[in-house]
Image (cartoon, rainbow, N blue to C red):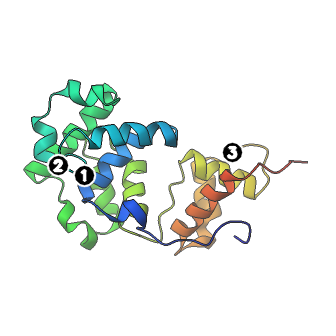
Amino acid sequence: MSRVDPFPGFPVGSRARGSHFEAIARSIVFQQLAGNAASTIYERARKLTPGPRFPKPDEVLAMPDDQFRGAGLSAAKTRAIKDLAVHCQDGRVRLRNAARMDDAEIVDMLSQVWGIGEWTAQMFLIFRLGRLDVMPAGDLGVREGVRRLDRLPERPTPAEVLERAEPWTPLRSVATWVLYRVCDQPPPEIP
């Protein structure tokens, strides 16, 4: 922790603004993409409607898929964002109540949406709701961070990450952030 910037707390910056819907849509856009590419696509998608925000659920549903595709979203990500909008409209996803729900309820609720899994729900918990005890053990960056931290020859499995993270409870989200920062640094030499 002494080698990385202090934990900023969450949510901060642009992630603290906008709606929960927008935050989850952003996570969908960023799934499995490099940060710069995802940022460019996300900014294009935000500009599909007037104003500075990402399209709202009703705007998403009214928009033809080819507009999202033209912004750079894949067919799968377009489908996921549209399915999220449907779930928000029909009440199966109740984002207005999210702050009062426990972590497992939120993961279960969001996982009903096509294209949203545990990772996306965990990113929402950490970066949007500011939950402090979330450990996305399957995240490649987290696994690589543990490998570097412990100077392991190979990345640990998600189960090994969970076991390693047990002492970090109830601040596993802080540990997650630190592990991401460890990955931002040059890797240590392994003997």
Q: Are marks 2 and 1 in contact (CB under 8 Å)?
A: yes
Q: Nearer the viewer, residue 80 or 38?
A: 38
- CA gap between label 2 and label 3 equals 39 Å
**Count of marks placed on residues:** 3
- Image location (x, y in percent) of residue 88: 15, 51
Q: Quadrant of residue 64?
A: top left
Residue drawn at x 59%, y 48% is 141
Locate residue 94 relative to residue 68 in the image: left or right.
left
Q: Amino acid at mark 2?
A: Lys
Residue at image x 74%, y 53%? Answer: 148
Q: Give the spatial CA distance, label 2 vs label 1.
A: 8 Å
Q: Position of residue 16 (x, y in %)?
A: 35, 65
Q: Which residue is mark 1?
A: 53
Q: Secondary structure at mark 2?
A: loop
Nearest to N terminus: mark 2 or mark 3: 2
Distance from Cα at disc 1 to Cα at disc 3: 38 Å
Mark 2 residue crowding within 10 angstroms, few (<14) / some (14–19) / many (20+): some
Q: Is residue 75 placed above or below 97 in the rendered structure?
A: above
Instruction: Name the residue tied to disc 2.
Output: 56
Question: Which-is-in-front pick, marks 2 and 1?
Answer: 1
Using the image as rendered, state which of residue 46 and residue 9 is in the foreground: 46
Q: Secondary structure at mark 1?
A: loop
Which residue is tagged 3? 155
Amino acid found under the numbered disc labelled 3: Arg
Q: Is residue 39 left or right of residue 54?
A: right
